[in-house]
Structure formats: structure tokens, C-alpha cells
Image: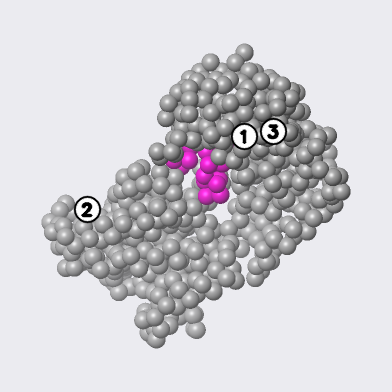
Amino acid sequence: MTLLELKNISVHYGRIQAISDMSFSVEEGEIVSLIGANGAGKTTTMRTISGLLSPSAGSITFAGEDITRMKAHIRVVHGISQAPEGRGIFPGMTVEENLDMGSYGRKDRTKVSDDLERVFDLFPRLKERIKQLGGTMSGGEQQMLAIGRALMSNPKLLLLDEPSMGLAPQFIRQIFKIVTEINNQGTTVLLVEQNANQALARAHRAFVLETGSITHRGTGKELLANPAVKEAYLGVG
Amino acid sequence: MSTTDGPTLIPDDSSAQEIADREAKMRRRKGWFPGLSDKWNALPRQTQWLFLIIVVVIAYLLPILNPPLITTEPGNNWQIALAQMSVYALIAVGLNVVVGYAGLLDLGYVAFFALGSYTSAMFTSPDSPYVHIPYLWTLPLAMAVAMFFGVVLGVPTLRLRGDYLAIVTLGFGEIVRILATIIPAMKGQVGFQNVGHPPGTDSAGQTIFQNSNGTPWYWLTLSIIIVVLLAAGNLERSRVGRAWIAIREDEDAAEIMGVPTFKYKVWAFAIGASVGGLSGALFAGQVGFVNNQKFDIATSILFVAAVVMGGTGNKVGAILGGALVAYIPLRFTAIAEFKYLIFGAALVIIMIFRPGGLLPARQSLLAYGRLAYNKLRGINGDIPASGKVVLQSGKGADK
């Protein structure tokens, strides 16, 4: 079943077009990766899906419902949750307060503790540090917190914007492992990455973005083997 | 696993952890009273209440005690000074909701103060040709008027952020002052005399709330401050309060957590405005005279300075900051002329040595999450060894 569908989406910042006529879909249960260089429109795509930006043309459908004009805070309730670029945690709040904010929009509060348990299972480190201020944690921990916080709304679709940004290779591997784990638990994942190697290896399907439009599409493995992609994004060739 | 992972000479989990710990420790802020708020929170509820009651009793007794050294006499009447300090403290509490909780820099807060003053004056002063109502009725009316204009200003401008919002609010502050000058009904510099006061006479038949007697005004304002503080405290701990803090910390992140950011920003603006209107009405009553001279930009900046000085986001700090801003020029009359110079210097010094203000804020924001954590703890037994967490878990239980 198609969970998310973008149809002919265009996004403008003032007069500058960041995304032009983009269409793609995400099926339920998949990991889909969007890869591309700086300025290709990856983050813009993510912010459009989560509702922080509104498209100038086109439509977005989520779980069969048109959400093009829906406000971001309502999309969360419908099941779209984002771990923003640059982690975007609340620096002055402790780990537990950050996670608590993640469940802000929820109506079914009795289930919050189940999700908390799930987050602590995925990231035991967070449990050790529940009283620490978010802003004083290391980059890797902040990324864990951002993902954990996004999971606290029990989303159908998890949007991860560059989870590997600025992290040690050590943490990158761990984060991607956890992304697969989250997906195995039944959450659909849309991933935006510059780290093409990992992103393609983990993805069921992937898209390559260049200056606001999709230039290649296919399964993760196909794109990993694609000579053009290899040369441009994998540093081989 | 893949080629981009690079050599494996990088730190393993435990050493990366050590580095992170060390960095976190270095980043921890040192205050004048390290751990004071922790100690306070660790006290049992009864002790906290007892302590608060003593502070409140002392606050009520201040006009009678007239403590030497602290008193503003002989330069200024101590009771009237107290009344003015309490009005400034109330202003700071209201502005703290806007600037401190929601993080919206409002440089035109004086406008709401002015609206409150004028509401009170125009409905009670004999100089005003309009309907006259009892003074006490003008207090809720002033709140309503200020709140209305807070929403009117907020809805179009709160889509702006940071500096832009500050500029627009600055403009609004000026608009109200200039309107007071050019609209004939608001009587410009001539103003309104003999603004009303609460009813009541003492045993000798004298009016209790005289302009020359600060004590009853101080007690009235202090009582209102206590009520507003209780309300603000409840708001702070509510869903609304947590939403405000989240907006202050990161607006986009708050929005994608499901916080209707725009709505809550307008709320903060409206609530702040209503407290500003209330303090304006009290000020008008106590002074007994309102004209367009008291509501300039400098006053507005002074309000912001009070909040920042006291500790942005801390309501007790705001009271302290507001009271200090009014107190210093009254106590040290010799330097009153240079008050802005001194406040400027004081702010610079405070920002260097105490960036969070005199009493930095540290809210506890958990709501229903706490239930979840306690339940989790019950399921999984103790939290894994980490002295710090274990220490604090005892504290969490009695909250």
C-alpha cells in the first residue's frame, strides 16, 4: 500500500525554485533513501513533507488523505514524524523532557510508556542519561535523541534528515543499524543522506536528487551498481 | 562494512563516551550559588511552603518595617517607592511570559501598560467626558482591552521571528504613544487627573487609597502579584507552558512535535499583554495622573532590561528584576539621572558573569511523561549504574 505520495511538487523560496515537478511515492514498510549533493533539495523535500514548507504546486497524499495544505503540527498526529537536520533537539531540556515533547501531540497517552521502552531499547545510552541536558550531549547522542524523540509520537512514517551529518564513522554505522531495526519493527522510513553508500545499502528503494528533480531511481542495490551514481556520489569511477 | 567507514582506529564506544562526558562537564555553567535550585527542589514540600510563607509575610510587612539602609528615605517616600516597585515587578512578571517563556522579544510592551493606564484613567477621571465606572472595574477592563490589542498585534506579526518581531513591536509601542498625543480624546500632555481609586475609608473617615499613601497600593499590587504568580506557575507546568518552552528553544522542532506554535505564540502575547494592562491600571490609580509622557521607548526597554536582569524565564527572577529597576533610582537619588547608563553597565556585567540573569530559569517540564517513567522504572528495576541518575531518581519520586 502506498503510504506517502508526492505528485508534481514544486517548492519556491521567494522566486528561487528549490524543487521542480517532483513525484515519488513511499510504500508501507519500506526504507526509501533520497541522496544528492548539497543544494539538491533534499532538506527542502523533507520540510515539505513534514509541513514546515508549503509547496507552490502539486499535491501530497498520506495514507490516502490529501495533506497538501495541512499544518505541520497536525501531520504529526496523522503519523508523520521528523528528526530534523542538524538534530534540532531542545538544548535546554533534559533527555526525558525532550522525549516527553516527542509525545506532545498524542491522544493515546497510556501507550506513551510502551514507546518510551521501545526508544530505550533502541538507544540504551539515552536511558543512562535521562537527566542530562540535550545541549550538553555529544553529537551522536543528540542524533539518537532526535530519532528517539521522533519515535515518541509512534509515527507511521519516520523522516530522517541526514542522520549521519557530522558524526564519527563509529556512530554512523550504529545509527544506520538502528534505522534498519526501527524499520523491522514496522515503521516506514524516508531517509535523506549525503552518505550515499550507507543510505543505498540500507534502502529498499532510492532516488537521486539533482538541483530539485529526481534523476535516477531504483532499488538500493541497483543504484549502488549504477555507474553514473557511483561516479557522482560514491567516489568511485 | 563499507569503504567510507574508514580506518577503525577511531575511538570505541566507551572512550567516545568518556570524551562526551568530559565535554559535558566543561560546558556546565557555574553560578554564584551552584546547586541552589537543586537544593531548593530537594527540600520537602512543607519546608518550601513554610519558607515561602515567611517571605510573603516579610514582603507584606515591608512598608511598616521601613528597614534602615534598604529604605529609600529621606530622598523618596518608602511606601510610595514600594508601590512603584511592586507595579514594575508585576510588569516584569507579565513580560516574562512573552520574553521568558515563549522567547518572543517584545520591545513595545509599554504599549500595553499605556493601554491599561488610559483605560483606567478614561473611565474614572473627572477630566474624561465618558461613562464613569468604579475604579476596581477598570482593572479587568484594562486587562481585556490590552489583551484584545495583544491579539490584534499578535496575529499579523507573530509570523515574523526574532529581530523582525522586535522591530514591529517597537513600532507598535511608538504608535500607541503617538496616538495618545494626537487623538484629542486622549488629551496628550494635559492628561487625566484624579484617576479613581478603590473605595473605602478608615476609622477617621480618611480615604484609604490616597495617592500620597503608598502602603494600601503596595498591598493591593502585592496581592495581585501573588495571584498572577500562582496562575503563571500553573501555566508554566501545563501543556501550554511546555509548548512555550519548546517554541523558545526551537520553533521548527516544536512544530514538528505537534505543537501548534502560532496559536501558542498568540496566547503568550495576549496573556502578557493583559498583565501589562493590569499593571498600567494599577499605576494610573496609584499616581492618580496619566498623560503621554510616561510611555516612551526607553521605558519599554527598561521593562525588557528588568526581565533579562532578573533571569529570563524565571518568574521570581522577573519580580526581583522589576523591583530592582524601580528601586535603584529611588534609593540612590544622586545617580537617578544616570539610571540608563547604570542599567546599561549593569546589564553588560550581568550578561558577562551571569548570562542567565540573577536567577536563571530551570523549569521542570514533564507532565504525563513522569507517569510513564515511573512505570518503566517499575518494570525494569533500577536504572543502570550511573551515580548521577541514581542520585536524582530519589528526588524525582517525591515530586
In this figure, which colouring scheme has been used for the structure? one colour
Front residue of B249/B399: it is B249
**Which of the image's four quarters has the N terminus of chain A?**
top right
Position of residue A6 measured from the top left corner of the image (x, y, whole percent): 52, 22
Residue under label 2:
B133
Return the disc, 1 or 3, that comes first in the chain's sequence: 1
Q: CA distance from mark 3 to mark 2?
A: 81 Å
Q: CA distance from mark 1 to mark 3?
A: 12 Å
Mark 2 and mark 1 in contact (Cβ < 8 Å)? no
Judged by depth in the image, the label closer to the viewer, 1 or 3, is 3
Q: Is residue A3 left or right of residue B227?
A: right
Mark 2 and mark 3 in contact (Cβ < 8 Å)? no
Residue under label 1:
A36
Front residue of A84/A196: it is A196
Judged by depth in the image, the label closer to the viewer, 3 or 2, is 3
Q: Is residue B178 left or right of residue A187?
A: left
Q: Quadrant of residue A122?
A: top right
Q: Is residue A185 above or below residue B378?
A: above
Position of residue A95 measured from the top left corner of the image (x, y, whole percent): 69, 45
Q: Dot 1, how many residues are within 10 Å of its Cα: few (below 14), some (14-19), or many (20+)?
A: many
**Which of the image's four quarters has the C terminus of chain A?**
top right
* Residue numbers of the magenta segment: B245-264
- The amino acid type found where label 2 is placed reads Ile
Q: CA distance from mark 1 to mark 2?
A: 68 Å
